[in-house]
Amino acid sequence: MSQFQFVSHSTEETMRIAERLGQEAEAGDLFALDGDLGAGKTHFSKGLAKGLGVEAMVNSPTFTILKVYNGRLPFYHIDAYRLDENEEEELGLEEYMEGSGVTVVEWASNLRTQLPGRRVNITFKRVDEQERELIVCTDHVRFERIFKEFMDQ
Ligand SMILES: Nc1ncnc2c1ncn2[C@@H]1O[C@H](COP(=O)(O)OP(=O)(O)OP(=O)(O)O)[C@@H](O)[C@H]1O
Ligand SMILES: [Mg+2]
């Protein structure tokens, strides 16, 4: 598992790197996002969806918990901010995470469901108005490579 830090200087940059990750994503990939309100998790999710070829508008599903989109692969967008234990059990999130799509979870630490070991953890930190620090933890070499490419630019 490698951990590294990536600094995004704009909303566009966050969406651009997420789009690249979405282009490389494969069935069963999971992105577990954490970080404060307004840290950039939803913008990252929007970029990822775009990279997966999702044409529909991706919004923060705070009140719906789970939204399913069609792209090159199914895209599952989960927002665990307001998720309570019973709701989580009813949703049966394991089925999505182990399925044939790509999953993004905002507020992933709020989940009680055991997340699969092979995943990408990203903690977003607000530095200032435009800058966000992303602490990335993953053992997926293909995603690590994309972050490195962006850092070298
Ligand atoms: N570098 C950046 N990356 C992402 N968002 C940025 C950046 N700089 C500024 N922003 C702004 O920060 C806000 C991020 O909002 P977003 O909804 O993506 O956050 P969030 O982490 O999903 O919040 P919540 O926990 O409320 O769902 C937006 O208003 C966006 O324009
Ligand atoms: Mg959000």
Image (cartoon, grey):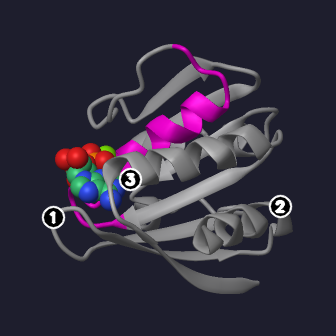
Please give the range of residues in magenta. 35-55
Among numbered discs 2 and 3, the one appearing first in the sequence: 3
Packing grade of label 2 (10 A; few <14, some 14-19, many >=20) is few
- Provide the residue designation for mark 3: 41
Q: Secondary structure at mark 2?
A: helix
Residue 107 screen position, x and y as percent: 39, 58
How many numbered discs sit on the rendered protein? 3
Q: Is residue 33 left or right of residue 116?
A: left
Instruction: Tell me the quarter of the picture where residue 74 sits.
Output: top right
Q: Secondary structure at mark 3?
A: helix
- Provide the residue designation for mark 1: 129
Residue 39 screen position, x and y as percent: 28, 61
Instruction: Tell me the quarter of the picture where residue 71 sits.
Output: top right
Among numbered discs 1 and 2, the one appearing first in the sequence: 1
Q: Please state, as top left, top right, bottom left or bottom right, where the C terminus lies in the image.
A: bottom right
Q: Is residue 25 magenta?
A: no
Packing grade of label 3 (10 A; few <14, some 14-19, many >=20) is many
